Amino acid sequence: ATPTALMVGTGRGAQLGLVIKGPEVLESTRRADTVVLDKTGTVTTGEMSLQDVVAIGAAGPQEVLRRAGALEHASDHPIARTIARAAMRTGTLPAVTGFADLPGLGVEGVVDGRPTLVGRPRLFADRGLTLPTELRSAVEEAEARGATIVLVGWDGAAHGALAVADTVKGDSTEAVRLLRGLGLRPILLTGDNSAAARTVARQVGIDDVDVIAGVLPADKVDVVGRLQAQGRVVAMIGDGVNDAAALARADLGIAMGTGADVAIQASDLTLVRGDLLGAVDAIRLSRRTLRTIK
Ligand code: ADP
Ligand code: MG
């Protein structure tokens, strides 16, 4: 009887837009008491708006945007797509060779013959690239108002920055409220800066203490592991390449159907529609199904 009920449960899941890897997944879904939410593309739409382009020295804003766009064109990060789209509106982008995606950090490659680096301030610091005062104050100002800064550099120096901002998905606030009502503690986990993370957290009703920001992809796994070491049963919901390891590590990995293939492969359950209310459906379904079995 038990396997049959579980099969019925997973079948019902499919009707709700939940792709469940196997019947045993319902058990970890039922037991989860903590839900770790990735920010970009999971709680937010990932369709970012480009708010500002800053250029310093001899470079103009157009050149900063076009060089960044040329590189970002090869990445499928939500920030990358936004920047590439904006840059393409200015005309044909310069040629790129030697492209490398640096998950959770940015992108690099040779644009128009110049080694070019695009990404978060942390990436520039890691490469020993210091920011001129003018650029540093632009970064601070944009981050203070909750934007995400993408630095653009070439030939070994920073030449500009792009400020992008994200939008919370329509159903995220309601989903967080319902998850809490089901007894799960929501935690926002992101590689983005803490002001941007808190701006989103506040909109969906997550307290500052439950915001973990500025983490690298490898640290996302550690956060999940630390919570498990505290005895928590962790559901992790994410969409990106950078979330894959944490999704695999979590007791229940939930991927957005709209996200990267590796995230979907690493997870136990996929929310086909890519909205967080699917996670609420999954938990309710698991509790109903397993109650029937007992
Ligand atoms: P999240 O945890 O919110 O999904 P990521 O771990 O993918 O974010 O990225 C962390 C941060 O690294 C981003 O907020 C952004 O600042 C930067 N970043 C990552 N990928 C890119 C990219 N392709 N271009 C520019 N910045 C990037
Ligand atoms: Mg993401």
Image (spheres, rainbow, N blue to C red):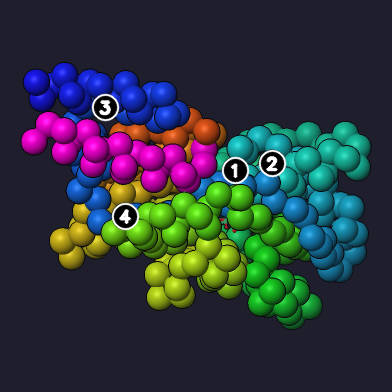
Q: Report the label total.
A: 4
Residue 265 image position (x, y, % from top left): 37, 30
Whether the residues at callouts 2 and 1 have beta carbons within 8 Å, the answer is yes
Q: Amino acid at mark 1?
A: His
Label 2, label 4: how many angstroms apart (C-alpha)?
35 Å
Viewer-side residue, 84 vs 186: 186
Q: Amino acid at mark 3?
A: Gly
Report the residue at 42% width, 29% height from top.
16
Residue 286 image position (x, y, % from top left): 25, 38
Q: Say above or below: 11 vs 118.
A: above
Q: Which residues are magenta?
A: 274-294
Report the residue at 56% width, 42% height from top.
101
In this figure, which residue is indicated by the disc labeled 2? 81
Q: Mark 1 vs ligand 1: CB under 8 Å?
A: yes
Q: Reading the chain from its start, which is encountered first: label 3 or label 4?
A: 3
Q: Residues within 10 Å of mark 3 (few under 14, many from 20)?
A: many
In this figure, which residue is indicated by the disc labeled 3? 9
Label 2, label 1: how many angstroms apart (C-alpha)?
6 Å
Kind of element beneath mark 3: helix
Label 1, label 4: how many angstroms apart (C-alpha)?
32 Å
Q: Reply yes or no: does residue 178 show up in magenta.
A: no
In this figure, which residue is indicated by the disc labeled 4? 182
Left or right, residue 242 beside residue 10: right
Q: Nearer the viewer, mark 1 or mark 4?
A: 4
Report the residue at 71% width, 58% height from top.
164
Q: Quadrant of the N terminus?
A: top left
Kind of element beneath mark 2: helix
Kind of element beneath mark 4: loop
Q: Is residue 157 visible?
A: no
Q: Reading the chain from its start, which is encountered first: label 3 or label 2?
A: 3
Whether the residues at callouts 1 and 3 have beta carbons within 8 Å, the answer is no
